[in-house]
Image: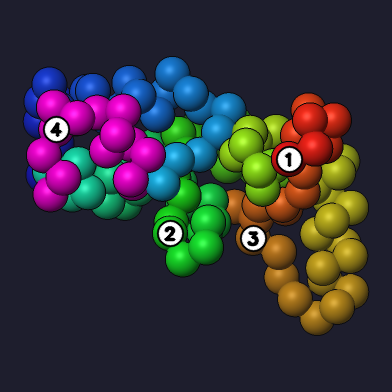
């Protein structure tokens, strides 16, 4: 069954799409979208994740982080700043090399893998 594109659904998609370079916890999305009731927002985030429009990129503490999934995000890995949440795409060559390293350890890397680090800007600001 297809999804209706309600105003609330479109607002959630628009929020994540407009900041596709980083991920957000549901609480951060809730703060940015105060007109959408909490239960509706969480249901929509779950639906959009199930549909592949959002991907769960990891956890911040014990909170899930969701990010808008661009069409090109299905075949490579990402690196995410643990401080500010900015996410960068790793190219196909970097992804392939990481997959080889992981494979040599007896694991299979997933294309949704997020590697955490600290970006230059956060390091310079001493965060």
Residue 45 x/y as whole percent:
28, 45
Helix, strand or loop under label 4: loop
**Which of the two discs, 1 and 2, labels the residue nearer the N terminus?**
2
Circle 1 packing at 10 Å, graded few (<14), some (14-19), many (20+), is: few
Pair 1/4: label in front: 1
Q: Residue at x 70, y 33 (%)?
A: 88
Q: In this view, does 89 lie to the left or right of 16?
A: right
Helix, strand or loop under label 1: loop
**Which of the two discs, 2 and 3, labels the residue nearer the N terminus?**
2
Q: Distance between the residues labelled 4 and 3?
A: 33 Å
Marks 2 and 3: CB-CB under 8 Å? no
Residue 76 visible at all: no
Helix, strand or loop under label 3: loop
What residue sits right under mark 4 in the picture?
36
Q: In which quarter of the image is the C terminus?
A: top right
Q: Which of 60 and 126 is in front in this view?
A: 126
Pair 2/3: label in front: 2
Q: Distance between the residues labelled 2 and 3?
A: 20 Å
Q: In which quarter of the image is residue 87?
A: top right
Mark sitting on residue 63: 2
- In reply to whether residue 33 is colored magenta, the answer given is yes
Residue 110 x/y as whole percent:
64, 60
Mark sitting on residue 33: none
Q: Distance between the residues labelled 1 and 2?
A: 20 Å
**Which of the two discs, 1 and 4, labels the residue nearer the N terminus?**
4
Q: Distance between the residues labelled 2 and 4?
A: 20 Å
Q: In this view, does 25 lie to the left or right of 2?
A: right
Q: In this view, does 46 lie above or below 72?
A: below
Instruction: Report the residue that reaches farthest toward the bottom.
Output: 106
Residue 81 x/y as whole percent:
69, 42
Circle 3 packing at 10 Å, graded few (<14), some (14-19), many (20+), is: few
Circle 2 packing at 10 Å, graded few (<14), some (14-19), many (20+), is: few
């Amino acid at each position: 069954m297809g999804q209706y594109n309600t105003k609330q659904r479109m607002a959630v998609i628009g929020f994540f799409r407009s900041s596709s370079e980083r991920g957000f916890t549901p609480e951060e999305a809730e703060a940015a979208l105060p007109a959408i009731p909490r239960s509706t927002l969480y249901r929509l985030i779950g639906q959009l994740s199930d549909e592949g429009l959002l991907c769960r990129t990891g956890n911040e503490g014990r909170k899930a982080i969701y990010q808008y999934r661009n069409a090109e995000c299905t075949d490579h890995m990402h690196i995410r700043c643990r401080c500010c949440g900015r996410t960068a795409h790793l190219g196909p060559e970097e992804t392939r090399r990481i997959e080889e390293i992981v494979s040599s350890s007896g694991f299979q890397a997933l294309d949704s893998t997020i590697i955490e680090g600290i970006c230059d800007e956060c390091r310079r600001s001493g965060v």
